[in-house]
Amino acid sequence: MFRKICIFIILVFILSACGRKTPPFSIEESIPKKFSFEVKPVSTGFELFVSLPTRTKAGYPLTQIKKLIVKKEIFSPNGKFIKEEKIKLNPRIHTAANTYFFLDSKVKSGLCYRYSVRVVKDFLVKTDFLAGKLLCWQAPPPPPADFKVVKRDSAFELFWKGVKESPQVNYQVRRLLDGKEKLFSVKLPPFKDAPEFKNFLCYSVRGVINYKGTLIPGDWSRKVCFYKE
């Protein structure tokens, strides 16, 4: 009889323990794991690519983010701080891709910007701000005018009108050869190329201005293509 009572007590204890919830994680353990972001100048402003965290410091999956805070510090060209702005975003974590894209087109010529990013999981749980480097902005050069490509036997020669009033402008030639893209840096036209292609070959060109170390691209010119006969 005594043995049966002991077995009964042990079973009750085991069954009651199975229904208990796992103790909650601390704030430190719930903080999203390390993440990263990149800032890229484009013709319309600065693009931010944020690689969102998918796990917490404790190692369990991070299924939801309350918001993403982008801190935008604005400086004069000589590095003097002007003001700070905060941009609040609402990204969604997806199992197939965890990269979040944001375009900041509210930039002015002659000013410099530094972006920092923070991930907020909930009211109490958030990461520190991750800071990027300082980038400066100037209006990008217009698309090169009178762009043309002349075929000479198996070679191609590219011509366009450069931006004469801005000596800081260089150029990028984009070559699309049978679906594979390659970029060439060019100081001034013309540009000569002699590739072999099976199906098609396309060229376009754009200006890139160097403003205080930030390379700001303009829009691409029209595309000129050749097809294998």
Image: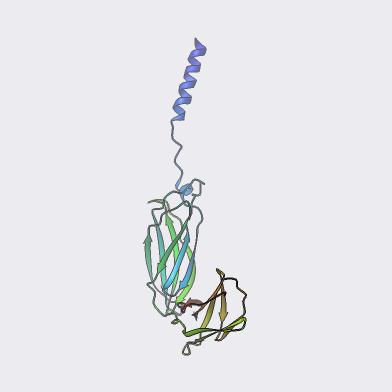
Quick one: which residue is furthest to the bottom in this view?
Answer: 164
Quarter of the figure that contains the C terminus: bottom right
Residue 178 rendering spot, x and y as whole percentages: 57, 70
Quick one: which residue is furthest to the top in this view?
Answer: 1
Residue 76 rendering spot, x and y as whole percentages: 42, 78
| Rendered residue at 49%/84% (across/down) | 147
Q: Nearer the viewer, residue 148 or 97?
A: 148
In the picture provided, is 185 more to the left or to the right than 63? Answer: right
Q: Is residue 14 above or below residue 209?
A: above
Residue 174 rendering spot, x and y as whole percentages: 53, 76
Q: Quadrant of residue 87?
A: bottom left
Q: Is residue 203 above or below residue 126?
A: below
Q: How many marks?
A: 0
Residue 30 rendering spot, x and y as whole percentages: 46, 48
Can residue 176 be seen here? no
Can residue 173 be seen here? yes
